[in-house]
Image (cartoon, rainbow, N blue to C red):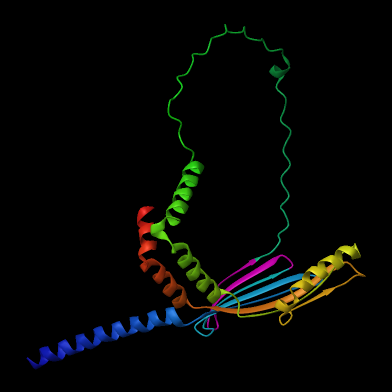
Amino acid sequence: MAALILILKIIMWLILGILGLLLVILLTVLFVPITYRVDGAKHEAMALRGIVAWLFGIVRVQIEIVNKKTVFVVKLLWKTLSGTKDEQEEPEAKPEKEPVPKDKSSSEPMKTPEPAPPTTPKPEKESMQTKETPEEKTFDKVKDTIRFIRSPEQKGTLRVVLYRLKKILKSILPRRFNGSIRFGLEDPFVTGVLAGGASVFYPKYYRNLSIQADFDEPGFEGDFALRGRIVIGVIAYHGLRLYMDRRIRRIIKKFK
């Protein structure tokens, strides 16, 4: 009897351990953020580099584009799991086609067959019902959806959807951004017009972006750096709130 109780306790502890491990994995996926960083520059050549990291850099995805050459690497700690390099390869020379010898029979004149008597085409039966194209069906479904959302029963649905999407987008967008731009056109007047238009929004970007107009030498140079993070739990929370809304579920059931 004591041995049976001991076996049951061991099984119970194993089940609790597995459940606890699954809970830790779930919480890690939901609340450990995925960080991303993108750096770019355009001077004599264009360069772009991006890094996506998870679990505090244990899992990393790196991509680098320099002079139209792409390097893509996936790393786990210090070990490289996969990587690709896209380099411009010289096109292979196509083998020359050998001349096809002319057939003597081709030089002989061909006899033209006698024309067949003309046949009058039979009139086809016109179908009374015209088939809808896939574009028309999609357009009708979109119109029905808009009409259904604007109905008095669904008042406020669009406002709820836009609110949740705004929250999701805010959690994904970069939290830090810095950059500088120097531009110049051949016509100094157009350069001045663009610089004046950019100065209208100066109070919005003066802390993070520097814009310099060059009236002497035409060209475009600049660099930027942005940082951000994505939390799966935030996206899942707002998505679940949308799905649990009765009005949203009614729309999903209607158009399934």
Q: Could you say which is closer to the camera, residue 234 or residue 38? A: 234
Measured as percent of width and height from the top left, residue 163 is found at: 49, 70
The residue located at (50%, 46%) in the rendering is: 139
Q: Could you say which is closer to the camera, residue 128 or residue 77? A: 128
Q: Which image quadrant is residue 195 in?
A: bottom right
Q: What residue range appears in magenta?
A: 67-85
Is 33 displayed left or right of 197 in the figure? Answer: left
Is 163 displayed left or right of 7 in the figure? Answer: right
**Compared with residue 170, is residue 113 higher up or lower down, i.e. above or below?**
above
Q: Could you say which is closer to the camera, residue 105 or residue 28? A: 28
The residue located at (38%, 62%) in the rendering is: 247
Measured as percent of width and height from the top left, residue 25 is found at: 39, 81
- Name, please, the residue furthest toward the front: 152
Q: Is residue 211 visible?
A: yes
Measured as percent of width and height from the top left, residue 18 is found at: 29, 83
Is 13 displayed left or right of 28 in the figure? Answer: left
Measured as percent of width and height from the top left, residue 32 is found at: 47, 82
Judged by its main secondary structure, the magenta piece is strand
**Compared with residue 132, is residue 65 higher up or lower down, i.e. above or below?**
below
The quarter of the rendered structure image containing the N terminus is: bottom left
